[in-house]
């Protein structure tokens, strides 16, 4: 059986940074299974003592080896209490802030919640505006203001257009619309008329017919929509259409949303606006 180890992500903010950095490190160790526990908004030493220590110590008693704790706590006293747990504590602020202070010749502000707060109000507004835009233009829902789109994703139904659009909007403030390619487009051997004037904004997603069938089968079991031959035919026609129209595309079958989004940003030479 694979070894299973408890991992805590502890933060005085959302915990997103601790999770992101922690996951990047843990993926380097194959053959291990991790039980992940995220504890956000831990805003001081007393909260660490009352909320975090009991859970960490309980995990330590329940199994071997000892838990791993990834922390992004700004408060120095809170970090000191966390080390009383006896777990392996990896604190990202301690690892990076101290060398940066030495290099820059100044002390950091030690302000809680800056990395994922709404401190930059204009940037935050841009992200919310991008999310609203992507939701309004999901699955060809609206043709209005398509000229404002930074990118328009095209592909067959369930190829990953919607989650990719929303990820681009939420993470990077990118206005991403998406438009389905349907059997009528394949019969005409042409893009939907509304997309012709935005050809330079188009980017395609494709997927393996086998994976497409699995996804569609969950949505509409044993229907023509999820039929294996229909999925194969739609993917084949969509790829042929995108190739004929000179649209860049990526296969989403084995790629994460993060990989797909990063590839799109690179290929269309669009700067990341939010982190």
Image (spheres, rainbow, N blue to C red):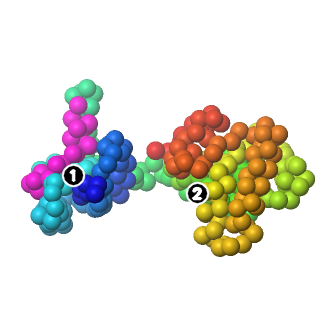
Segment colored magenta: 83-99
Evaluate if marks 2 and 1 touch, with contact meaning CB atoms under 8 Å apart: no
In the rendered structure, find residue 163 and report the number of the disc placed on it.
2
Residue 68's disc is: 1
Q: Residues within 10 Å of mark 1 (few under 14, many from 20)?
A: many
Regarding residue 213, the answer to whether it shows in the image is: yes
Magenta stretch containing residue 135, yes or no? no
Q: Secondary structure at mark 2?
A: helix
Q: Residue 159, image x and y in percent?
A: 65, 55
Query: Of helix, strand and loop, which mostly describes the magenta segment?
Result: helix
Quarter of the image with the N terminus is bottom left
> Residue at the spot x=53%, y=44% of the render?
259
Task: Characterize the local packing of mark 2: few (<14), some (14-19) or many (20 or more) Cα atoms within 10 angstroms.
Answer: some
SS label for mark 1:
strand
* Residue shown at the point (60%, 48%) measured from the top left: 252
Q: Residue at x 34, y 41 (%)?
A: 28
Pick the residue in front: 138 or 154.
Answer: 154
Residue 13: percent from left, percent from top? 32, 56
Work out whether mark 2 precedes mark 1 in sequence or the reverse, and give the earlier one: 1
Residue 90 lies within the magenta run: yes
Q: Position of residue 199 (x, y in %)?
A: 79, 42
Foreground pick, 214 / 114: 214
């Amino acid at each position: 059986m694979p070894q299973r180890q408890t991992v805590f992500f502890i933060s005085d903010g959302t915990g997103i940074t601790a999770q992101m950095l922690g996951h990047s490190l843990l993926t380097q160790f194959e053959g291990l299974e991790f039980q992940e526990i995220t504890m956000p908004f831990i805003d001081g030493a007393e909260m660490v003592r009352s909320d975090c220590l009991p859970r960490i110590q309980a995990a330590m008693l329940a199994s071997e080896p000892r838990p791993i704790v990834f922390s992004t706590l700004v408060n120095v006293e809170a970090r000191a209490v966390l080390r009383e747990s006896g777990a392996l504590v990896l604190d990202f602020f301690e690892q990076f802030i101290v060398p940066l202070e030495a290099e820059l010749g100044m002390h950091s502000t030690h302000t809680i919640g800056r990395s994922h707060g709404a401190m930059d109000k204009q940037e935050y507004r841009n992200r919310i505006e991008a999310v609203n835009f992507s939701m309004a233009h999901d699955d060809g829902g609206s043709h209005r203001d398509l000229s404002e789109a930074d990118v328009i994703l095209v592909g067959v139904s369930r190829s990953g257009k919607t989650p990719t659009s929303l990820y681009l909007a939420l993470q990077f403030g990118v206005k991403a619309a998406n438009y389905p390619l349907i059997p009528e487009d394949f019969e005409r051997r042409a893009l939907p008329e509304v997309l012709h004037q935005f050809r330079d904004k188009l980017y395609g997603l494709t997927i393996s017919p086998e994976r497409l069938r699995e996804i569609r089968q969950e949505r509409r079991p044993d229907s023509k929509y999820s039929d294996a031959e229909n999925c194969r035919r739609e993917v084949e026609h969509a790829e042929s259409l995108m190739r004929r129209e000179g649209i860049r595309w990526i296969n989403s079958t084995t790629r994460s949303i993060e990989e797909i989004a990063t590839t799109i940003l690179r290929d269309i030479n669009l700067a990341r606006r939010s982190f």
